[in-house]
């Protein structure tokens, strides 16, 4: 099975700009990508990036929007698409995703996004805009494809907002939590709520 990892290399993780500089956000994004590639190391992943990035795996540059870039690579063989900002993912999580038996397998993200897909139907096309997990299920049914959902915490947590970083500190096992701690990142509980804090910047 072909495995694609889309990566937004231009001004990544802009919603973390209150915490990190552009250079730090780029490094954080690349660190999360490395964690994802580590979990995928048994599957020969290919990175699809919108700007040059150094990776240990084959990398294709495609400046088109995410949906267009992914759809251009679907159709001729079964394909998995795993987002690059899932630093909690493990090898066994990936195995569960790839071994789920359906024409289209969807792994939802928090807030209605789609964090991973497996596509075995040549007529299916993605649409990553809006509530994409709902749209992908509807698109699959529209082409007569069977659909399955992988309900996975580790696939469900993608990193976009400062609050998401708490999950990395508490549950991450690879390089991303170490990177955050090296920069003073910590989980702080106040009034029963746990938040991400950065020493010297909050």
Image (spheres, rainbow, N blue to C red):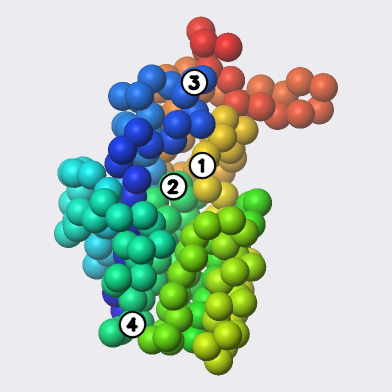
Determine crowd level at label 2: few under 14, some 14-19, many 20+ residues with C-alpha closer than 10 A. Answer: many
Mark 3–mark 2 Cα distance, whole angstroms, equals 17 Å
The answer to whether mark 4 and mark 2 are in CB contact below 8 A is no
Residue 17 in sight in this render:
yes
Seen at 47% across and 55% down, the residue is: 89
Other residues around mark 4 within 10 Å, as few (<14) / some (14–19) / many (≥20): some
Element under label 2? loop
Question: In the image, is 146 to the left or to the right of 24?
Answer: right
Residue 37 shows up from this direction: no
- Up-down relation of residue 15 to residue 56 (above or below): above
Mark 2–mark 1 CB contact (< 8 Å): yes
Q: Residue at x 31, y 24 (%)?
A: 23
Q: Decide if residue 23 is on the left or right side of residue 177.
A: left
Q: From the image, tell me which residue sits under label 3.
A: 19
The quarter of the picture where residue 40 lies is: bottom left
Residue 146 location (% of width, % of height): 57, 88
Mark 4 in CB contact with mark 1 (< 8 angstroms): no
Earlier residue among tags 3 and 2: 3
Choose the circle earlier in sequence order: 2 or 1: 2
Q: Marks 2/1: CA distance? A: 6 Å
- Mark 4 vs mark 3, CA separation in Å: 40 Å
Where's the C terminus, which quadrant? top right
Query: Distance between the Cα atoms at labels 4 and 1?
Result: 29 Å
**What residue sits right under mark 2 in the picture?**
85
**Secondary structure at numbered mark 3:** loop
Identify the residue position indicated by label 1 in the image: 159
Numbered mark located on residue 75 in the image = 4
């Amino acid at each position: 099975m072909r495995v694609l990892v889309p990566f937004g290399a231009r001004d990544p993780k802009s919603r973390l700009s209150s915490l990190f500089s552009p250079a730090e956000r780029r490094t954080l994004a690349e660190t999360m990508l490395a964690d994802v590639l580590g979990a995928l190391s048994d599957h020969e992943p290919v990175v699809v990036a919108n700007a040059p990035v150094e990776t240990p795996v084959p990398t294709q540059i495609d400046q088109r929007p995410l949906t267009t870039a992914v759809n251009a690579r679907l159709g001729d063989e079964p394909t998995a698409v795993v987002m690059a900002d899932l630093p909690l993912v493990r090898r066994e999580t990936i195995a569960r995703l790839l071994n789920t038996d359906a024409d289209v397998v969807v792994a939802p993200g928090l807030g209605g996004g789609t964090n991973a897909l497996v596509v075995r139907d040549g007529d299916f096309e993605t649409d990553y805009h809006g509530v994409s997990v709902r749209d992908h299920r509807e698109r699959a049914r529209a082409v007569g494809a069977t659909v399955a959902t992988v309900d996975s915490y580790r696939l469900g947590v993608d990193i976009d907002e400062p609050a998401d970083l708490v999950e990395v500190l508490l549950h991450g096992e690879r390089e991303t939590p170490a990177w955050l701690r090296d920069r003073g990142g910590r989980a702080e509980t106040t009034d029963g709520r746990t938040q991400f804090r950065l020493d010297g910047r909050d």
